[in-house]
Image (cartoon, rainbow, N blue to C red):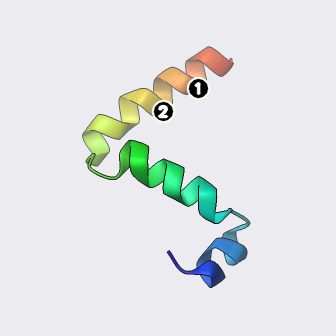
Amino acid sequence: MSVAVCRKHGVSDASIYSWKANFGGMDVSKAQPKALEDENTRL
């Protein structure tokens, strides 16, 4: 991941690495339920 892209979006390289480790192999259909579950937990 380019440092310039991380800076542009205000995200650290470490965050990108973590997200890729968790979600790198998933397609959208697998990632969405987890995002919805996290949002419901937060609410």
Badge 2 amino acid: Ala
Question: How many C-alpha atoms fall within 10 Å of the one at disc 1: few (<14), some, or many (≥20)?
Answer: few
Separation of marks 1 and 2 at Cα, in angstroms: 6 Å
Badge 1 amino acid: Glu
User: Measured from the top left, where is residue 11 in percent x and y?
Assistant: 68, 62
Q: Foreground: 21 or 30? A: 21
Residue at figure coordinates x 48%, y 27% from the top left: 36
Label number found at residue 2: none
User: Measured from the top left, where is residue 4 in percent x and y?
Assistant: 64, 84
* Residue bearing the label numbered 2: 35
Residue at figure coordinates x 54%, y 80% from the top left: 2
Q: Foreground: 14 or 27? A: 14
* Residue bearing the label numbered 1: 39
User: Measured from the top left, where is residue 37 in percent x and y?
Assistant: 48, 21
Label 2: which secondary element: helix
Question: How many C-alpha atoms fall within 10 Å of the one at disc 2: few (<14), some, or many (≥20)?
Answer: few
The answer to whether residue 29 is above or below residue 21 is above
